[in-house]
């Protein structure tokens, strides 16, 4: 068994989490919709310039709320990249929609807008811009396509907090966007997420959906004297304890992001000079005039065999590197939806070659040098 001494991820910690947890316990509001929840929501709304934000128990639940808010029905279609996390498809499949899987760009691994145009039908309700690794999708083109066809544009920002496209924060382009605070993400509270609403007309219903289908929010604001069942809904509100933990990280979000970006750029510079020129590996790309979030750092190895050899070599040196999404269309569920190998060639190619390297707040230059040396040695051996 190999001992891991450089893990793929170490959850972000600022050192102030306990202080805020203690304050939340002492103020006696442990359940949802408490003072820390409001603080986090306000911070996200102000920082990203989004009209309304609701913390949720996960990004998956924020995605389910999107489907409920769009009143997705049996037979509707939602276009999303096959190179994606399963929740994007499931959140809509749960309500009877068909996930229509599209191919991605080879340089960003993001939805290829040319494929989107071909996949739109009279049943298409929404198009998902998943900003993979925090690299912005082609938002100008996707916005134009969706506006001209009157289809909702939705964003998955699980990796993309604080990234921008043309000077505008990601999460502000779609009608709605989902954030994740899972422990592998840039900021965390263990499990958590947020729903960002750019269409304020959805806010009242969102407040009902996440409070089990009741008008408890109106009650808490003193607008009604008792709360009752008014709509369908579920329990999507995180405990204020989780929001207290998250607040410790939002307070330092910019500094955390800058440190991550420095690590990301260090890898990029070192590999550009060596791995790319000598061994034919590929590095992440991004559209012009964009700021990425340093959500993930990955290399595209020349082949899948090479990727496996590099991953195994790193593991033998105690370094954890990993692949990413098994394309949705090649999964068991994807096959049940009628997809087969060969349907989305770019996705299949990049999913076989991608290698994600350790990246987290607190990763040292010494650790990065060991990762870089390990990758270079493995590539020099021919993968
Ligand atoms: C792109 C993307 N969206 C959504 C999710 C789901 O996030 P959560 O665990 O908060 O539900 C993930 C999980 O890794 C993800 O990678």
Image (cartoon, rainbow, N blue to C red):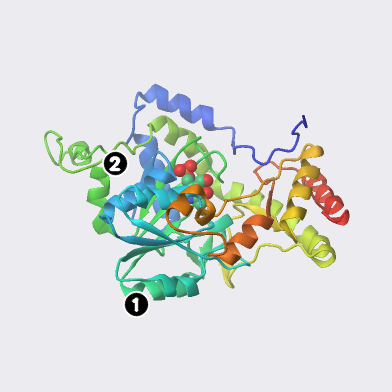
Q: Which secondary structure, mark 1?
A: helix
Q: Residue at x 23, y 43 (%)?
A: 208
- Residue 148: give its label: 1
Other residues around mark 2 within 10 Å, as few (<14) / some (14–19) / many (≥20): many
Res 42 seen here = no
Side (left or right) of 337 relative to 326: left
- In depth, the one of 95 and 200 nearer the eye is 95
Q: Quadrant of residue 217?
A: top left
Is 162 in front, or is 86? 86
Relative to 152, residue 296 above or below = above
Q: Nearer the viewer, residue 282 or 247?
A: 282
Q: Quadrant of the C terminus?
A: bottom right
Please rate how many residues cluster around mark 1, counting C-alpha atoms within 10 Å: few if below 14, some from 14 to 19, many from 20.
few
Dot 2 beta carbon under 8 Å from ligand 1 = no
Residue that label 2 marks: 210
Q: Residue at x 51, y 37 (%)?
A: 248
Q: Residue 253: percent from the left, percent from the top?
A: 54, 47
């Amino acid at each position: 068994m190999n001992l891991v001494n450089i893990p793929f991820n170490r959850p972000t910690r600022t050192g102030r989490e306990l202080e805020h947890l203690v304050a939340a316990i002492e103020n006696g509001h442990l359940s949802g919709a408490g003072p820390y929840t409001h603080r986090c929501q306000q911070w996200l709304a102000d920082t990203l310039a989004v009209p309304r934000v609701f913390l949720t128990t996960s990004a998956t639940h924020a995605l389910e709320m999107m489907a409920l808010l769009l009143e997705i029905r049996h037979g509707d279609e939602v276009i999303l990249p096959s190179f994606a996390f399963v929740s994007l498809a499931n959140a809509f499949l749960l309500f009877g929609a068909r996930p229509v899987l599209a191919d991605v760009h080879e340089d960003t691994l993001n939805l290829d807008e040319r494929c989107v145009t071909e996949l739109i039908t009279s049943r298409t309700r929404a198009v998902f811009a998943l900003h993979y690794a925090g690299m912005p999708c082609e938002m100008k083109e996707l916005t134009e396509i969706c506006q001209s066809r009157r289809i909702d544009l939705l964003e998955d920002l699980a990796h993309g907090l604080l990234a921008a496209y043309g000077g505008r924060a990601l999460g502000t382009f779609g009608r709605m966007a989902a954030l994740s605070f899972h422990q592998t993400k840039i900021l965390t509270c263990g499990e958590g997420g947020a729903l960002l609403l750019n269409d304020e007309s959805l806010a009242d219903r969102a407040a009902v959906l996440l409070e089990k289908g009741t008008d408890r929010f109106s009650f808490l604001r003193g607008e009604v004297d008792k709360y009752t069942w008014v709509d369908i809904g579920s329990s999507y509100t995180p405990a204020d304890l989780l929001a207290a933990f998250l607040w410790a990280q939002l307070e330092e979000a910019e500094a955390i992001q800058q440190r991550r970006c420095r690590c990301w750029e260090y890898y990029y510079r070192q590999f550009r000079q060596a791995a790319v020129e000598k061994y034919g590996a590929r590095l992440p790309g991004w559209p012009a005039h964009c700021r990425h979030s340093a959500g993930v750092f990955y290399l595209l190895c020349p082949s899948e065999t090479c990727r496996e050899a590099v991953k195994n070599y790193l593991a033998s040196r105690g370094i954890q590197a990993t692949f990413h999404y098994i394309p949705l269309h090649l999964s068991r569920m994807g096959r049940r939806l009628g997809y087969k190998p060969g349907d989305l060639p770019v996705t299949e190619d990049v999913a076989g070659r991608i290698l994600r390297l350790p990246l987290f707040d607190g990763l040292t230059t010494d650790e990065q040098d060991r990762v870089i040396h390990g990758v270079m040695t493995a590539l020099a051996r021919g993968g």
